[in-house]
Each structure stands twice: as C-alpha cells, then as structure tokens.
C-alpha cells in the first residue's frame, strides 16, 4: 500500500533551494524528480535533504551565531539560562566558525593542514624533546631547586604524546582520506537507512539519479541501480533475499 503524498516537501526541506540548485545545475530535472519521489513515498525531506547537501559539499561552510541564538540553543537543550551566561555570550559577540560536512574525507582538513609524514616528523620531535628534558631534569640543580611538579609532568606528557597518542593517530590516518571516504560512507549509509525505514525499499535507481546530478560523473561512469546495489552490499546494507529477487523481477528493490 502506497503512503499518501507529502505536501510542500520542497518547502520543508533543509537547504531546499540550495539542494535543488545542485540537482538541476546540469539543466536536467531528473535528480530533482528522484528526490521529490522519495519524499512523496514517505521520506523526511529535512532529514534527507541535509544529508544530500553534506554529501555534495566537500568544502568548509561558514557558520555564524549571535549571542541570542546561542542562549536560545542552550535553553532548548534544557540548560538553565542565567544573567551571567547572557552576559558572557554578549561579550563574545557574533561568532564565526567553519563546518566541514566531509572533513574526514580530506587528509588536509582532518589533520589541520598536516600530512602523514608531518605527523611522523612531529612524533620524532616530541620524542627527542622529551629525552632532552629528561636529561635536564636528572641534574642536581633541578633536584634541589624545583618543587613545582609541572616541568616533570610536561616531560612525561611529551613522552606519552610521542609513544602512545601519535602512534594511535597514525593508525587512524590509514582509515580516512579520499580513498576510504568515511564521511561520505556515513552520510550515504544514513540516507539509505532512512529510505529503507520510511519506504520499505532501497530505491537504488533514485539514489543513483540523485548522486549523478549532485556529484557529476564521467560520461561512461554514471551510477546505476546496479552499481548502487553493489555499494550497499559492500557496506552491509542488503536484504539478500530481496536483492536477489530484484535482479530477476524488479529493477528497483
């Protein structure tokens, strides 16, 4: 049984105008029509639209907040708004920060401008500095005149940073970047799960149409229902029985 169409889906979509402009920038209506069809079938246009905008956005976005907005956000989260809080926020004034929707898909953004070799070099620098500080602290003067523990804590922290924290960070680097695309994978997985939850189908051909118009593609590398079905299976988003049936009878599982 089909769900009733949702009215004014586009108007209630987060960043609707921007999303539609992305879907139609190649002068085709197919991407927009696929998005509207998913909304008509029961998907939440705000939830779906936000994730699709994030998928299409690989550059930082500026987020501006005013003191009143931050106070209201704090109130909505159940916080107790006091005069001190309001005064503090007003003193901070208008704040601007960058938001990276797919920051983990870029090594440069994820590492704050560092490359993996830079992190490895930093590890060696921290290790050498910790060794030099240990040598300084072993001298008699330090033993006699230093009753403040912070210099010794700094040395231990540097050693931990070099021998424990940075090795862990270097391991994680292998799982981020443009090849692994963890943020793209997370956003598309959330998109697919929402579609399946709301419509009881995966709608691979609609997703393929949307992604083709959002992200573009070489002429001979357009995404298809088959390629999206393969992506889902490789990321454990698959009802094997339904997918097997769809290959025989239904072009849109």
Image: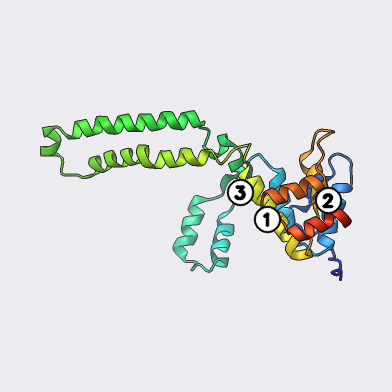
Residue located 61% across and 48% down the image: 63
Q: Earlier in the sequence, mark 1 or mark 2?
A: 1
Binning the other alpha carbons within 10 Å of mark 1 as few (below 14), some (14 to 19) or many (20 upward) gives: some
Closer to viewer: mark 1 or mark 3: 1
Q: Which residue is mark 3?
A: 64
Q: Which residue is mark 2?
A: 205
Closer to viewer: mark 1 or mark 2: 2
Q: Horizontally, is 186 left or right of 119 in the view?
A: right
Residue 113 in the image, given as x and y percentages of width and height:
53, 33
Q: Quadrant of residue 70?
A: bottom right
Residue located 21% across and 45% down the image: 149
Can residue 224 be seen here? The reply is yes
Q: Quadrant of residue 150?
A: top left
Q: Quadrant of residue 75?
A: bottom right
Residue located 64% across and 50% down the image: 186
Closer to viewer: mark 3 or mark 2: 2
Q: Earlier in the sequence, mark 1 or mark 3?
A: 3
Residue 173 in the image, given as x and y percentages of width and height:
52, 38
Q: Horizontally, is 141 left or right of 224 in the view?
A: left
Name the secondary structure under disc 3.
Answer: strand
Answer yes or no: do the residues labelled 3 and 2 have beta carbons within 8 Å? no
């Amino acid at each position: 049984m089909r769900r009733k169409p949702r009215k004014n889906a586009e108007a209630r979509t987060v960043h609707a105008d921007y999303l539609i402009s992305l879907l139609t920038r190649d002068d085709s209506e197919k991407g927009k029509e696929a998005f509207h069809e998913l909304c008509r079938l029961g998907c939440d246009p705000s939830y779906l639209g936000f994730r699709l905008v994030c998928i299409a956005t690989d550059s930082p976005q500026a987020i501006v907040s005013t003191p009143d907005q931050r106070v209201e956000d704090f109130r909505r989260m159940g916080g107790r708004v006091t005069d001190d809080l309001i005064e503090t926020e007003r003193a901070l004034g208008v704040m601007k920060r960058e938001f990276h929707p797919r920051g983990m898909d870029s090594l440069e953004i994820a590492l704050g401008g560092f490359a993996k070799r830079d992190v490895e070099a930093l590890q060696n620098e921290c290790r050498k500095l910790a060794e030099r500080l240990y040598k300084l602290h072993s001298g008699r003067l330090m033993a006699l005149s230093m009753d403040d523990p912070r210099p010794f804590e700094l040395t231990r922290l540097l050693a931990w940073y070099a021998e424990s924290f940075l090795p862990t960070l270097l391991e994680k680097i292998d799982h981020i970047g443009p090849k692994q695309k963890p943020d793209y994978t997370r956003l598309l997985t959330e998109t697919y799960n929402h579609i399946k939850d709301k419509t009881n189908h995966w709608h691979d051909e609609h997703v393929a149409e949307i992604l083709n118009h959002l992200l573009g593609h070489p002429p001979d590398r357009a995404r298809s229902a088959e390629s999206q079905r393969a992506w889902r299976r490789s990321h454990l988003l698959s009802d094997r029985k339904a997918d097997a049936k769809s290959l025989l009878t239904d072009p849109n599982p």
